[in-house]
Amino acid sequence: MLSNWSTESVTLTANPDYWGGPVAVPELHYVSYGDNAALTTALVSGEADWAQAFLPQIQTSFLAADKEHNKFLVSPTAGAATLFMNLQTKPFNDKALREALAWTIDRQAYVDIAREGASQAVWSVTGLGDLLSKEILPQYADQKYSVDVDKAKKILTDAGYTWKDGKLTDPDGEAVSFSISVPSGWSDWNTEQALISEELKQALGIEVKVDQPDWGGWDAARQEGTFQAIIHWLEDTGNAYGMYTSTMDPKWIVDDRAQYNFGRFDDPAVTEALNTYANASSEEERAAALAVMQKGFVENVPAIPLGAHPLLGEFNTRNYVGWPSEEDPYASGDPTQPGIVQILTKLTPAG
């Protein structure tokens, strides 16, 4: 039950009339921290007991601080961290540039460096990761991106791009540059910003400016479409529909403000397929709609998935036991997910 709310914290108290009886945890205090470093400090000190965040060098920064009690759980999902590009303005209103980026950005570097291994690279041209590989159509089963700078340069050259003094120049004679925006303090994606900037400058001569605003500024820009590129998560539906509705569905744009499909992709055939899939009454209908959606994604490159985006949970067993684990993954360890209800019914006082 909601007992207190402010812009920086929320307090929930256990419902005394809950049909399942009393729960062990009487209150939950959700507190906002400025960045991942501040949250790590709070978890280590005991100021915070439960969180979901990417913690840099988690083995040494959090787990080693109390090897007996501090725990970390990674729960796979069908979603992916994704580079959304504003398709309404230069330079991303040109599919050739988007495709060239897809052949240049190193997804494995995202996994190994930005995420410190807590992800899986997404290379399929369909945008689908390993968990959804069975939904990849046969004609795309073996079609995967790789880091192929020569291929990227040929795509650009064929589209009328040139290089001047080492800088990529578009068909209008303008140097290609853009900014990529992620909130300050989101350390994994901040690292990926730097990686993409370096990769594209060295490989294609594109200047990528790293923008790290506060949450409010970033949130407004992603909704209003005033950004050039952002890294964002997807709507996780557990199937391919989540990827394609998140990146191509106009339904997410209401009163010119976007909740997904931040690039504002709009293709009537794809939109119809998305609607059909969402309301289909048979597997045949869904399969036919999926074929249209997947073809639209492959041919238009509306976004570039980077790597799987698992649910993360950090917690400790000093006060309560019964948490989900790799041996008993009855829920994710993420305290922002619906599974928290199940966790609260399983926790019991430690000792």
Image (cartoon, rainbow, N blue to C red):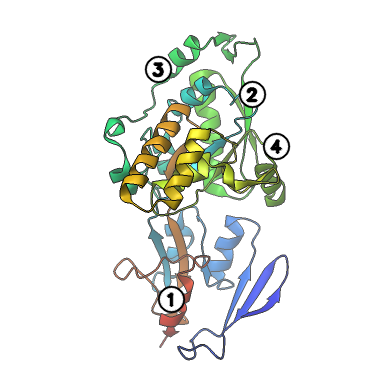
**Quadrant, the C terminus:** bottom left
Q: Residue at x 61, y 23 (%)?
A: 91
- Which residue type carries mark 2? Lys
Q: Secondary structure at mark 2?
A: loop
Instruction: Mark 2 vs mark 3: give the one in front.
Output: 2
Q: Residues within 10 Å of mark 4 (few under 14, many from 20)?
A: some
Q: Which residue is mark 3?
A: 151
Q: Nearer the viewer, residue 280 or 92?
A: 280
User: At x 39% / y 54%, what residue is drawn?
Assistant: 238
Indicate the position of residue 346 as horizontal and vertical percent values: 40, 81
* Residue 91 in view of the camera: yes
**Residue holding disc 2:** 90
Q: Which numbered tag is attached to residue 226?
A: 4
Could you tell me how far apart the alpha carbons at marks 2 and 3 are, in whole angstroms?
A: 22 Å
Q: Is residue 114 visible?
A: no
- Residue 29 lies left or right of residue 315; in this view the side is right
Local crowd size for mark 2, using a 10 Å CA cut-off: few (<14), some (14–19), many (≥20): some
Disc 1 crowd, CA 10 A, few/some/many (<14, 14-19, 20+): some
